[in-house]
Image (cartoon, rainbow, N blue to C red):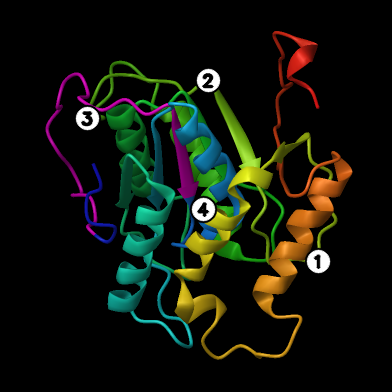
C-alpha cells in the first residue's frame, strides 16, 4: 500500500474509527530523502523481519537548486519502491519555513492516530537546518497529542511507545549514539534508495572522489567499525533503551 508520495492530507477529516492499517514503525522526515539518509537501513531490516514500516515526509523539499516538485515526487516514488515500504505519505507542510504550529501538530497527531505505529523515528534534535529542528519539536508534541481523549482530533487515541532519533544533520556534529545498528546486509539497497534522489545527491555535485555518496559510504563504514561489522547506522534515544536479553548485543 503506497499512496502518492506527494498527496497532502486534508486539513480535517471525520473520525475514521479503527485504522485498517497499523504500522510497527513510522519514520517521520522533514523532507523526502531524510528518511533514506538517516534510517533506510533500519527500515530495510525491520521490513525483512516482518514488521510493517512507513514514512511520512513533512514537506516536498522544494525549492532546491536542481529539483522540482514533480521530479522530487518521482524520486520519492522510486526510493519507496526500493525500500519496499508498506505506507508513505506527504503531510504537505511548507519547506524552508516548517514550524511546530498547533495546526501542524494536529495534522501530524491525526496521522499517528490513523496508522498507530509502535515506534516513531525522528531527526536528531541538534541540527543546523531549522526545518529539522522544527520537525523534531513537532513530532514530540504530536506524539503527546495523539494520545489525548476528549478532544477534537480525528481517530482513536494512540501513544507510540518510543521515539528513536536518526542522524541526517546539516552540522559538523560528532554523534554520541545510544546504539549502532548493523546494516551490512542491506547497505547496497540503502545506497540504491539514496541514489534515487538524483537531483539532490548526484546532479550538480562534483564527479571526482570523494563524492557525496563516497562520504556516506565512509560514514557507514566508520559506524560499522565501531561495532565490528562492515556498515552501521547510528541512533539515539532520550529515554533508556531496554533489552530482554544481552544476547541481542553484538
Rendered view: 187 above or below 78 = above
Q: CA distance from mark 1 to mark 4?
A: 19 Å
Q: Residue at x 79, y 22 (%)?
A: 249
Which callout, 2 or 1, points at the residue further toward the start of the chain? 2
Extreme residue in the top direction: 244
Name the residue located 51 percent from the left edge and 53 percent from the top edge. Answer: 35
Side of 232 where 138 appears, left or right: left
Mark 2 to mark 4: distance in Å? 20 Å
Q: Nearer the viewer, mark 2 or mark 3?
A: 2
Dot 1 alpha-carbon crowd within 10 angstroms: few under 14, some 14 to 19, many 20 or more: few
Kindly identify which residue carries mark 4: 35
15 vs 78: above or below? above
The answer to whether marks 2 and 4 mark residues whose Cβ atoms lie closer than 8 Å is no
Q: Can residue 23 be seen?
A: yes
Where disc 2 sits, the SS reads loop
The label shown at residue 172 is: 1
Sequence order check, earlier mark of 3 and 4: 4
Give the residue at mark 3: 154
What residue is disc 2 on?
161
Front disc: 1 or 4: 4
Camera-nearest residue between 132 and 217: 217
**Closer to the camera: disc 3 or disc 4?**
4
Q: Which quarter of the picture shows residue 1? A: top left
Q: Is residue 70 above or below residue 42?
A: below
How crowded is the residue under tag 2: few (<14 C-alpha within 10 Å), some, or many (20+)? Answer: few
Vertical arrangement, residue 87 with respect to residue 171, above or below: above
Residue range of the region highlighted in magenta in the rendering = 7-28
Q: Residues within 10 Å of mark 3 (few under 14, many from 20)?
A: many
N-terminal of the pair, mark 3 or mark 1, is 3
Upstream in the sequence, badge 1 or badge 4?
A: 4
Amino acid at each position: 500500500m503506497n499512496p502518492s508520495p506527494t498527496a497532502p492530507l486534508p486539513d480535517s477529516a471525520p473520525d475514521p474509527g479503527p485504522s485498517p492499517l497499523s504500522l510497527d514503525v513510522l519514520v517521520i522526515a522533514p523532507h523526502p530523502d531524510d528518511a533514506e539518509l538517516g534510517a533506510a537501513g533500519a527500515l530495510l531490516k525491520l521490513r525483512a523481519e516482518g514488521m510493517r514500516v512507513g514514512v511520512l515526509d513533512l514537506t516536498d523539499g522544494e525549492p532546491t537548486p536542481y529539483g522540482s516538485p514533480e521530479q522530487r515526487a518521482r524520486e520519492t516514488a522510486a526510493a519507496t519502491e526500493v525500500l519496499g515500504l508498506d505506507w508513505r505519505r506527504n503531510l504537505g507542510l511548507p519547506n524552508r519555513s516548517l514550524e511546530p504550529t498547533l495546526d501542524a501538530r494536529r495534522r501530524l497527531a491525526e496521522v499517528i492516530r490513523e496508522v498507530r505505529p509502535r515506534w516513531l523515528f525522528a531527526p536528531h534534535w541538534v541540527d543546523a537546518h531549522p526545518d529539522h529542528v522544527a520537525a523534531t519539536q513537532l513530532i514530540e508534541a504530536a506524539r503527546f497529542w495523539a494520545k489525548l481523549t476528549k478532544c477534537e482530533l480525528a481517530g482513536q487515541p494512540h501513544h507510540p511507545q518510543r521515539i528513536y532519533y536518526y542522524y541526517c544533520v546539516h552540522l559538523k556534529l560528532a554523534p554520541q549514539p545510544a546504539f549502532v545498528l548493523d546494516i551490512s546486509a542491506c547497505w547496497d539497497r540503502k545506497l540504491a534508495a539514496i541514489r534515487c534522489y538524483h537531483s539532490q545527491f548526484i546532479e550538480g555535485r562534483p564527479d571526482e572522489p570523494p563524492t557525496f555518496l563516497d562520504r556516506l559510504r565512509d560514514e557507514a563504514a566508520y559506524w560499522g567499525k565501531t561495532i565490528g561489522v562492515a556498515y552501521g547506522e547510528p541512533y539515539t534515544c532520550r529515554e533508556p533503551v531496554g533489552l530482554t536479553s544481552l544476547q541481542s548485543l553484538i
